[in-house]
Image (cartoon, grey):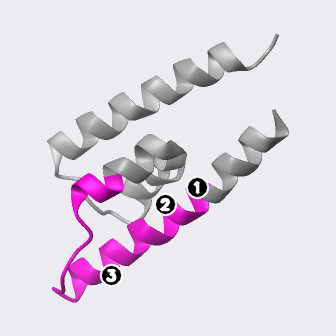
Amino acid sequence: MPALWLYLGIINGIAFLFFILDKRLAVRKKQRISENTLHLIELLGGVFSIIILIPVIRHKTKKINYWIVSLTILIVWIIALCLLIPY
């Protein structure tokens, strides 16, 4: 189980960097990171940091479709972790 927590820590660090970078690119009106790429990172486990960052850095707050996909991925991860963690 410690390997899972290490993995989640690393992937959430990567997700954090990608999301911050996308926000900076948006502000500078440069080529952005695609939403599909951000969702892939979320699906790989980076959803926890991105869900926190959305309101904190006010990025993608008005994109309802982005929120729906992100929250769905979050729910899937929470269910998966509940099934994996022994009681």
Where residue 57 is drawn, which disc sits there? none
Q: Disc 1 versus disc 3: distance between alpha carbons? A: 20 Å
What secondary structure predominates along the stretch shown in magenta? helix
Q: Looking at numbered disc 2 in the image, what kind of residue is underneath it? A: Ala
Identified by mark 3, the residue type is Arg
For marks 1 and 3 on the same chain, the one whose residue lies earlier in the sequence: 1
Q: Amino acid at mark 1?
A: Ile
Magenta segment boundaries in residue numbering: 11-38
* Residue at the disc numbered 3: 24
Among numbered discs 3 and 2, the one appearing first in the sequence: 2
Disc 2 and disc 1: Cα gap in Å? 6 Å
Q: Characterize the local packing of mark 2: few (<14), some (14-19) or many (20 or more) Cα atoms within 10 angstroms.
A: many
Q: Quadrant of the C terminus?
A: top right
Mark 1 or 3: in front is 1
Horizontally, is 71 left or right of 29 in the view? right
- The reply to whether dot 3 and dot 2 touch (C-beta < 8 Å) is no
Q: In the rendered image of this protein, does residue 1 appear above or below residue 55? A: above
Compared to residue 71, the image places residue 35 above or below, namely below
Q: Which residue is tagged 1?
A: 11
Residue 10 appears in which quarter of the rendering? bottom right
Q: Residue at x 33, y 48 (%)?
A: 39
Q: Mark 2 — residue? A: 15
**Residue 26 position within the rendered picture, expressed as x and y whole percent measured from the top left:** 22, 78
Residue 47, position as x, y percentages in the image: 47, 45
